[in-house]
Image (cartoon, rainbow, N blue to C red):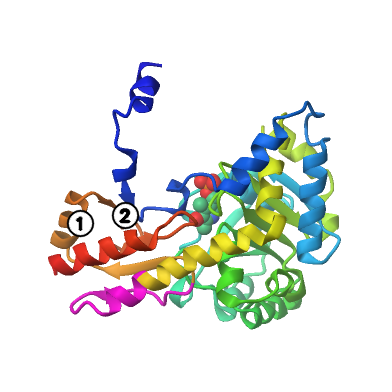
């Protein structure tokens, strides 16, 4: 309590915290906040039986232009873990890139939720799983002692800020069809990928053969809440029980779904993603003009990866900049709906002065 009062009293200069650490450092976008306030004006049925949840699901069906099944859970780890658990049996395996969040950052959540389905790690440049790598993992063994491959998981946009094009996904779908595999998409930055590719959301999901999408609202501008979208509706059988058992059924569900309505109305989700991508592009272009600093991966969505000497990283941090270096040592600079162009420019000026 004392700490909250201290914060409210201005004990912390909130404006001063400058960061490119992650898109989930950002706050809630105004449209989502307003929808949340609106949902607070009346009582509503609990556990997703409310009007907001119905509307958000309908709007997602409209957005994807197909009759899909939609569920809302609290976070991305739960969305991925529960979706993957519903896509195979415990003796199956899930093929993903070695950098995939489900492998590196979910504390074994997918294996836990599926009672043991094993992740098989594939490779590919720029964080993208290649058809060859998938083919290799599927065909190298077919005996009873190997966990039977059942699912391919693609992260869109990837952990290193690149995107799978519709053609990339279609090619992977061909491999999937050949071997009877399902496709899961970790869409923690799905909105950024749609904005980057300038495609209709259906073109990089069900039309390209994706069975289940975990569509993040959190990184796009919500406080919390991810949509699990089943294009392959048969995989959604009893999914609500899976969510409930895992502690992922929100009793006041409308406070997840109403903000989703705020994002979906007038394509706020897309505007948020376009803004984040544009800020990343501004960063990328500014960095490209600074001699002696190397970009690490192609900048395609809202993240910029840059090789910086340790001393420069340290000096930037001393100036108050926050960023992570957990992927291969390069500095990851993430932009969000809330990133300001002047913030990008201040970072660039600081960086320029240090190299
Ligand atoms: C952020 C993120 C998630 C979700 O993480 P949670 O912290 O569980 O919400 C999933 N996949 C990727 C690639 C992410 O960046």
> Where is 351 relative to 51, above or below?
below
Secondary structure of the residue carrying tag 2 is: loop
State left or right for residue 353 relative to residue 339. Answer: left
| Foreground of the two, 160 or 337 | 337
Number of numbered discs present?
2
**Residue drawn at the location 74% of the way across and 39% of the way down:** 242
Q: Which segment is the magenta one?
A: 283-300
Front in this rendered view, residue 167 or 95: 167
Q: Residues within 10 Å of mark 1 (few under 14, many from 20)?
A: some
Image quadrant where residue 353 sits: bottom left
First along the sequence among labels 1 and 2: 1
Q: Does the numbered disc 2 mark a residue whose Cβ is under 8 Å from ligand 1?
A: no
Respond yes or no on whether mark 1 lies under 8 Å from ligand 1.
Answer: no
> Which residue is disc 2 drawn over?
323
Residue 124 location in percent, x, y?
48, 76
Tell me if I can see residue 8 in this picture.
yes
User: To which quarter of the image does residue 140 belong?
Assistant: bottom right
């Amino acid at each position: 309590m004392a700490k909250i009062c201290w914060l409210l009293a201005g004990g912390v200069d909130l404006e001063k915290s400058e960061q490119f650490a992650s898109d989930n450092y950002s706050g809630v976008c105004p449209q989502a906040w307003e929808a949340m306030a609106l949902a607070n004006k009346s009582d509503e049925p609990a556990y997703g039986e409310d009007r907001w949840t119905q509307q958000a699901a309908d709007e997602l069906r409209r957005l994807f232009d197909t009759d899909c099944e939609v569920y809302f859970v609290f976070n991305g780890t739960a969305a991925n873990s529960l979706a993957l658990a519903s896509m195979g049996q415990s003796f199956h395996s899930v093929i993903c890139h070695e950098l995939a969040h489900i492998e590196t950052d979910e504390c074994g959540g997918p294996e836990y939720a599926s009672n043991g389905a094993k992740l098989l790690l594939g490779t590919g440049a720029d964080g993208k799983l290649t058809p060859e790598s998938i083919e290799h993992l599927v065909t190298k063994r077919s005996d009873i002692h190997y966990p039977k491959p059942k699912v391919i998981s693609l992260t869109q946009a990837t952990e290193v800020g690149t995107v799978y094009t519709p053609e990339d996904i279609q090619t992977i779908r061909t491999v999937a069809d050949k071997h009877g595999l399902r496709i899961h998409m970790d869409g923690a930055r799905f909105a950024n990928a749609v904005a980057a590719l300038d495609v209709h959301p259906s073109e990089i999901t069900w039309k390209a053969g994706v069975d289940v999408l975990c569509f993040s609202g959190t990184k796009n501008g919500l406080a919390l809440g991810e949509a699990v979208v089943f294009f392959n509706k048969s995989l959604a059988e009893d999914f609500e029980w899976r969510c409930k058992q895992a502690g992922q059924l929100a009793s006041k569900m409308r406070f997840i779904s109403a903000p989703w309505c705020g994002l979906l109305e007038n394509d706020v989700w897309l505007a948020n993603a376009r803004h984040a991508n544009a800020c990343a592009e501004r960063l990328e272009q500014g960095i490209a003009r600074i001699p002696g600093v190397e970009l690490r991966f192609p900048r395609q969505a809202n993240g910029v990866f840059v090789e910086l000497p340790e001393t420069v990283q340290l000096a930037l941090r001393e100036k108050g900049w926050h960023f992570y270096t957990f992927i291969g040592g390069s500095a990851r600079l993430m932009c969000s709906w809330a990133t300001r162009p002047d913030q990008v420019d201040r970072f660039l000026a600081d960086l320029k002065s240090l190299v």
